[in-house]
Amino acid sequence: MTLLVVVTGPPASGKTSLARALARELHLPWLGKDALKEVLYDVIGSGDELEPKLEEAARRLLPAIADAQLRAGVSAIVESNFDRDSDLAPLERLWQDGKTKVVQIHCTADEKLLLDRFAERAASGRRHPGHGDSPADVEEVRRDLERGRWDALDLPGELIEVDLGGDVDVSALAAEIRERP
């Protein structure tokens, strides 16, 4: 049986850092939507006109690559700020064979902390410029948080809520994932 770990949550919640640390701890490949988008930005470019197409391409690539991994018998970690309203259907084929155990890690933090992190990250210049994040986008992120856009997904299997407002014991979390039926 293969394992699919789905790491989700709002922007700036720490999900990418957690997913990468879990991948190292569990010795699993990590597939992140933003990493895919950044390759697309580097090859195709970025900007308001291209963003919807690049977002959709990355949204489709992530489950396609994960599906290839799982069909080859290789467990995987997929990570994104999956939208609870639009991103579930593309993921469903990943566990329909009945041979894949799904564990969802939903990353959360206090809303003020998330918004502060988002604004700081957008202003820092550390993020790939293709994302086009701006501190002015904080109000849009706030509205999406309030409407539950990045709430936990309705997935089969286990759900583990992780508050990334503080320290997380990645080894203990990996052990919990391994122990899940």
Image (spheres, rainbow, N blue to C red):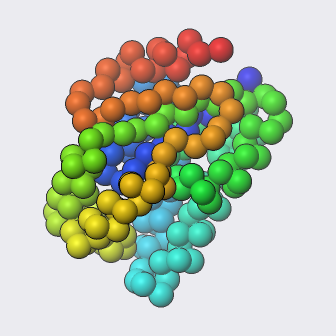
Horizontally, is 97 left or right of 23 in the view?
right
Position above or below: 30 against 12: above
Question: In the rendered picture of this protein, how many numbered marks are placed on residues?
Answer: 0
Using the rendered view, name the quadrant where residue 64 is placed: bottom right
**Quarter of the figure that contains the N terminus:** top right
**Quarter of the figure that contains the C terminus:** top right
Using the rendered view, name the quadrant where residue 17 is placed: top left
Horizontally, is 128 left or right of 33 in the view?
left
Tell which residue pokes out farthest to the bottom in this image. 49
Can I make out residue 125 in this image?
no
Residue 164 at x, y = what percent? 30, 35
Using the rendered view, name the quadrant where residue 168 is placed: top left
Who's the residue at 28% across and 47% down the image? 111
Position above or below: 42 against 165: below
Position above or below: 89 against 167: below
Tell which residue pokes out farthest to the top in this image. 179
Who's the residue at 59% across and 69% down the image? 56
Give whichever of 168, 136 is nearer the camera: 136
Position above or below: 111 against 125: above
Can I make out residue 152 in this image?
yes
Residue 40 at x, y = what percent? 49, 71
Give whichever of 100, 105 is nearer the camera: 105
Who's the residue at 60% across and 69% down the image? 57
Residue 161 at x, y = what percent? 44, 30
Tell which residue pokes out farthest to the right in this image. 97
Residue 120 at x, y = what percent? 17, 58
Give whichever of 35, 146 is nearer the camera: 146
